[in-house]
Image (tube, rainbow, N blue to C red):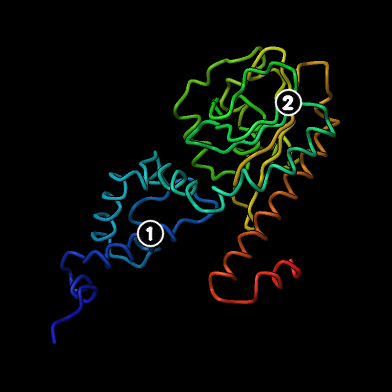
Amino acid sequence: MSPSPATRAGNGDEPSRTGMLERSFAILGAFRPTDRAVPPAQLARRAGLSKATGHRIIQEMISLGVLEKAEDGVRLGLRMFELGQLVPLQRNLRRAALPFMSDLREATKATVHLAILDGTDALYVEIMQRADNLPSRVGGRIPAYATGVGKAMLAFSPSYVVDRVIDEGPLRKLGPNTITDPQELRRELATIRRNGVAYDREESTPGVVCAAAPILSLDGAVVGGISVTAPTGTISPQRVAPAVHIAALGLGRTLQRNMEFRTEDAQGGDEPEQIAREA
């Protein structure tokens, strides 16, 4: 009997498609939450691969944008983040968010934005507008570092996403208080992680302020962000921040329940009515 492709690959031959995929996922799984960058030889060792095999696969993953070179080794590439935005949870975000956005608008009498990270930009996927003539629009985008909802998402994103924002620099000034110093931005993001809310203090647009919070999955991954925005002097961002934070938490839980509902239904589990009652 001839050896399987995976066995042949283990004997030093070129890995089969299946073998290459398995080894690629082993490399991705070898990254740790605290890693900024990992030398290729160390990454291969963690993945249980020989140095030569690991180097060959890592180079191909770099060429595909799955990994990218860094000063101290390699790190996850932005392509991984982009693919993550295509999961069904992301597509259902807008529909689940609408009731929360409506409640926020009524409670604050201000414009409510729903955004996702698209590369290094905040991309607006829904806006419930008040009569305040704000320049934002659905489908519009803005550098994430320069707006409250963008900073809220960046603060809870993997470190390589923040690195990418800074590495693409320089950070351009969009409003009178835009943060343009990389170290100051990192300190701001650390504060946002501690507090769970972010503020735009005329950073994206002159005369506009906002309070924002990230929408997180159960395991802490960023799904999107939600914000309350208004002309300076018409709201207190600090006062509306708790309401924004609570809405973001509630939306995250709703998305998680919806995902569990669909998973149970797809697996032929309990009847939909029963799942809904238990949720």
- Residue 135, image quadrant: top right
Q: Which residue is mark 1?
A: 27
> Could you tell me residue 243's position as x and y percent?
82, 39
Q: Which residue is mark 2?
A: 229
Q: State how far apart marks 2 and 1 are (Cα).
A: 42 Å
- Left or right, 27 with reference to 112: left
- Left or right, 218 with reference to 247: left
Q: Quadrant of the N terminus?
A: bottom left
Mark 1 lies on a secondary structure that is helix
Q: Quadrant of the C terminus?
A: bottom right
Residue in view at x 80 percent, y 39 percent: 103
Asked whether residue 224 is in view, the answer is: yes
> Could you tell me residue 125's position as x and y percent?
58, 35
Of labels 2 and 1, the one closer to you: 2
Vertical position of residue 220 compared to residue 265: above or below: above
Residue in view at x 67 percent, y 42 percent: 214
Vertical position of residue 124 compared to residue 65: above or below: above
Which one is in front, 262 or 35?
262
Amino acid type of the residue tagged 1 in the rendering: Ile
